[in-house]
Image: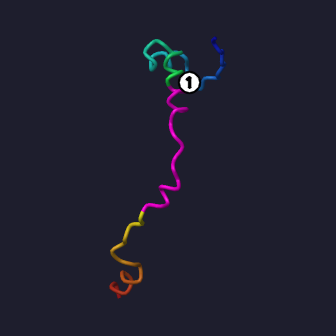
Amino acid sequence: MTETITIRLRRPKSELLKKSGGNLNRWLNGLIEQALDQPAPDWDAHFRRPRRRFRYTADEVRSAGR
């Protein structure tokens, strides 16, 4: 079974054909698969990471400059 999707191009079709290597449908399907297969970012893991330790605080830098 084949589904047909219509898209509006922002770039000339000739430019897209050149970029795709001649098979525009395969290239577009690959881009769609790539976008759908990317996992959602794990924000919980991001916020559980230990924070960087800064060598100096702003107060130490300010008092050293005086």
Residue 52: percent from left, percent from top: 38, 67
> On the picture, is 50 further left or further right than 2?
left
**Region rendered in magenta:** 31-49
Which amino acid type is shown beneath numbered disc 1?
Arg
Q: In the picture shown, does residue 32 fall above or below 51?
A: above
Q: Which residue is mark 1?
A: 11
Residue 59: percent from left, percent from top: 41, 83
Magenta stretch, main secondary structure, is: helix
19 in magenta: no
37 in magenta: yes
In the foreground, 20 or 51? 51
- Quadrant in the rendering for residue 58: bottom left
Q: Residue placed at 37% from the left, 71% from the top?
A: 53
Q: In the picture shown, does residue 59 fall above or below 18?
A: below
Q: In the picture shown, does residue 62 fall above or below 15?
A: below
Q: In the picture shown, does residue 4 fall above or below 33?
A: above
Image quarter where the C terminus lies is: bottom left
In the foreground, 15 or 4? 4
Residue 55: percent from left, percent from top: 33, 74
Q: Residue placed at 64% from the left, 11% from the top?
A: 1
In the foreground, 16 or 46? 46
